[in-house]
C-alpha cells in the first residue's frame, strides 16, 4: 500500500510517540525456548503423595500480521487492523512419582484480531479478541476452547508517557470473567523505560512489569516480572469429568535484547518463585469450589529467542 509523504510523517510521529508500536506495522515472527531444571513436587497439605520431581521445557512461537492501515493525512487519524498468533508447547519430564500428577505434554494456542484507532485530544483505543485451544493432546473438544476479548483506551500525556485502561473478558477459569486492563509506557531519564502490560501478548492471562535500560543503540537490558495463568482441558485422571487444569507461574527474569536490521535475538535467565496448578471442573456452578493446589519448587531457568521482522 502506497502511503503519501504526509501520511508517512504522521505514522512516524505516532510510532515515536508510542501511539502505535513500530513493530506492529510489519509482519514479525518470534521463537523463544525456555528450560527449567528438575524441581521437587509440592503436594497439597493434606496429601501423603509427596514424592516426585519435574523438569520443564517450553517452546513459544508467535507472529504478527498487519491486515489494514489507513491514515487520514488531513486530521492525522490512524486506523489499523492486525492479526496475531501464539503457539506454546510445554513438556514436563516427570520422575519418581507414585502416580501421575502432571501431564507430560501441554499445548496452548491463541489466534487473535486487534483493531486500533486514534481519537481526538491524544486519545486512542484498541479492541482485541482471540480464541485458542489449550489441551494435553489426549482429547480435544469444545471444552479445550478458551476465549479472551477486551478494549483498552489510551491517553498520550506527553512524548515520554502513555497510559491505557480498559477491561478484558475471558473464560480461562471455566466461566466468563471480567478483569481490569492496564498499560503504561514511561521513558524516564535518558535510557530507562517502564513497561506495564495487563494483559501481555501471550496465552491465557499474562502480565508484564518491566524496566529496561538502553546499553547501546541496538542493545537493551531488561528486568521483568511476568506472572501468567494458563488453563488447559486435560484428562490426567477420570476422577472429575471435563477436567480444568489452572497453571500459575510467577517468573522474574533478566534479559538482553539486540536488534540487527530485521533480525533480533534475546537471551536471559531468571527465577520462578511459584509454579502451582489445580484441577477443577469447567462448569459455572463449580466456579467457587475449592480444589487442592499442587506445585513445583521454585527454581532458576534460562531462555533464548530470535525474532524476524519481514518486509
Image: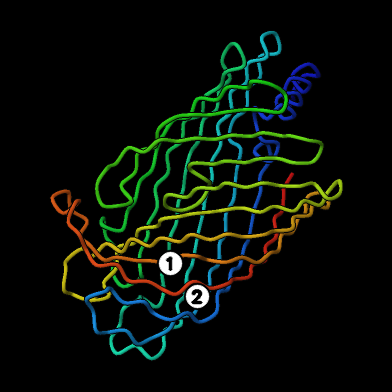
Residue 36: percent from the left, percent from the top?
55, 74
Query: Furthest-top residue in view?
Result: 74
Quarter of the rendering containing residue 19 = top right
Tell whether 243 sits left or right of 87.
left
- Among numbered discs 1 and 2, the one appearing first in the sequence: 2
| Disc on res. 80 | none
Residue 295: percent from the left, percent from the top?
37, 71
Tell whether 91 sits left or right of 33.
left
Taking 207 as reference, is 231 above or below it?
below
Disc 1 and disc 2: Cα gap in Å?
11 Å
Q: Look at the image and name its color scheme.
A: rainbow
Task: Identify which residue is drawn at 57% across, 54% down.
Answer: 62
Residue 168: percent from the left, percent from the top?
39, 37
Q: Which residue is mark 1?
A: 275
Q: Nearer the viewer, residue 141 or 210?
A: 210
Q: Nearer the viewer, residue 213 or 75?
A: 213
Helix, strand or loop at mark 2: strand
Task: Identify which residue is drawn at 40% across, 78% down.
Answer: 104
Tell whether 269 sits left or right of 243.
right
Task: Identify which residue is drawn at 76% across, 47% down.
Answer: 213
Quarter of the rendering containing residue 289 = bottom left
Q: Nearer the viewer, residue 291 or 154?
A: 291
Mark 1 crowdedness (10 Å alpha carbons): few <14, some 14-19, many ≥20: many
Task: Identify which residue is drawn at 44% across, 56% down.
Answer: 109
Rendered-image quadrant of the N terminus: top right
Which one is in front in this view, the residue at disc 1 or the one at disc 2? Answer: 1
Rendered-image quadrant of the C terminus: top right
Residue 199: percent from the left, percent from the top?
48, 43
Q: Which residue is mark 2?
A: 56
Helix, strand or loop at mark 1: strand
Taking 31 as reference, is 24 above or below it?
above
The answer to whether mark 1 and mark 2 are in CB contact below 8 A is: yes
Amino acid at each position: 500500500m502506497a502511503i503519501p509523504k504526509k501520511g508517512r510523517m504522521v505514522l512516524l510521529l505516532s510510532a515515536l510517540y508510542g501511539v502505535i508500536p513500530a513493530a506492529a506495522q510489519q509482519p514479525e515472527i518470534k521463537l523463544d525456548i525456555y528450560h527449567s531444571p528438575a524441581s521437587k513436587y509440592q503436594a497439597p497439605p493434606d496429601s501423603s503423595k509427596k514424592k516426585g520431581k519435574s523438569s520443564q521445557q517450553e517452546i513459544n512461537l508467535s507472529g504478527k500480521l498487519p491486515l489494514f492501515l489507513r491514515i487520514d493525512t488531513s486530521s492525522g487519524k490512524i486506523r489499523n487492523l492486525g492479526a496475531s498468533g501464539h503457539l506454546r508447547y510445554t513438556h514436563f519430564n516427570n520422575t519418581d512419582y507414585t502416580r501421575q500428577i502432571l501431564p507430560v505434554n501441554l499445548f496452548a494456542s491463541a489466534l487473535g484480531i486487534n483493531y486500533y484507532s486514534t481519537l481526538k485530544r491524544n486519545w486512542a483505543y484498541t479492541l482485541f479478541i482471540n480464541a485458542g485451544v489449550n489441551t494435553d493432546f489426549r482429547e480435544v473438544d469444545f471444552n479445550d476452547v478458551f476465549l479472551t476479548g477486551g478494549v483498552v483506551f489510551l491517553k498520550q500525556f506527553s512524548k515520554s508517557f502513555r497510559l491505557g485502561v480498559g477491561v478484558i473478558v475471558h473464560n480461562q477459569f471455566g466461566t466468563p470473567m471480567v478483569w481490569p486492563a492496564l498499560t503504561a509506557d514511561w521513558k524516564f531519564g535518558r535510557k530507562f523505560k517502564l513497561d506495564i502490560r495487563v494483559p501481555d501478548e501471550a496465552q491465557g492471562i499474562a502480565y508484564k512489569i518491566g524496566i529496561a535500560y538502553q546499553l547501546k543503540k541496538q542493545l537493551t537490558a531488561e528486568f521483568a516480572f511476568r506472572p501468567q495463568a494458563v488453563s488447559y482441558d486435560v484428562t490426567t485422571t477420570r476422577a472429575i469429568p471435563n477436567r480444568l487444569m489452572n497453571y500459575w507461574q510467577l517468573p522474574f527474569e533478566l534479559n538482553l535484547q539486540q536488534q540487527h536490521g530485521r533480525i533480533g535475538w534475546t537471551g536471559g535467565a531468571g527465577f520462578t518463585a511459584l509454579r502451582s496448578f489445580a484441577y477443577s471442573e469447567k462448569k459455572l456452578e463449580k466456579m467457587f469450589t475449592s480444589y487442592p493446589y499442587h506445585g513445583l519448587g521454585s527454581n532458576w531457568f534460562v531462555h533464548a529467542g530470535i525474532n524476524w521482522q519481514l518486509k
